[in-house]
Image (cartoon, grey):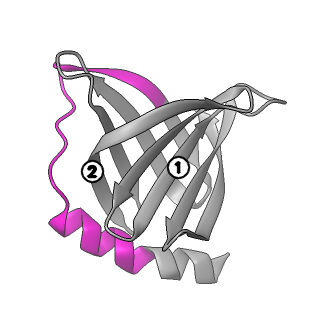
Amino acid sequence: MKTSALLLALPISILANFSLRASADSTAALLLSTKCQGGYNINIWQNYTSRELLYRATSPNGNLSLGKGTSQPTEGVRVYKFRSGIYEYWVWDGTLDNPQSGTLEVYKNKRILMKQACRKS
């Protein structure tokens, strides 16, 4: 668990400083808000006009803001996917067993780097 957090700290810190700004304010609707293990707080927004999906994350390792996400129903729950370079961030909105829970998954070069359990807030 500590290794995963350390491996994720650097990419999040770097991406937080160099990622394109994804605005989420009165022009966007909050679709999902979760609190995940490890202190990760994830918000998924959708711009009212463009319908663009936006990802906002805060954590002890830094903040990350991404745009141009996708959404798809998968195995009875919705998954939101965002990409930044070689990293992908997947946020599962619920599980088959519990619609109030979810999962944050981080991939590097299509290999899972971290998986954290989440709870809707």
| In front of the other: 93 or 82 | 82
Q: Quadrant of the N terminus?
A: bottom right
Q: Quadrant of residue 105?
A: bottom right
Whether residue 103 sits left or right of residue 54 in the image: it is right
Mark yes or no: residue 121 visible.
no
Q: Magenta residues? A: 9-32
Q: Where residue 100 sits: x, y (%)?
A: 69, 27
Q: Secondary structure at mark 2?
A: strand
Residue 119 vertical position relative to residue 25 in the rendered view, above or below: below
Residue at 50 percent of width and 81 percent of height:
7
Answer few, some or many: residues within 10 Å of disc 2's Cα (few below 14, many 20 plus, some between 14 and 19): many
Name the residue that disc number 1 marks: 90
Residue 20 magenta-highlighted: yes
Name the residue that disc number 2 marks: 65
The amino acid sitting under disc 2 is: Ser
Q: Where residue 39 sits: x, y (%)?
A: 52, 56
Residue 37 magenta-highlighted: no
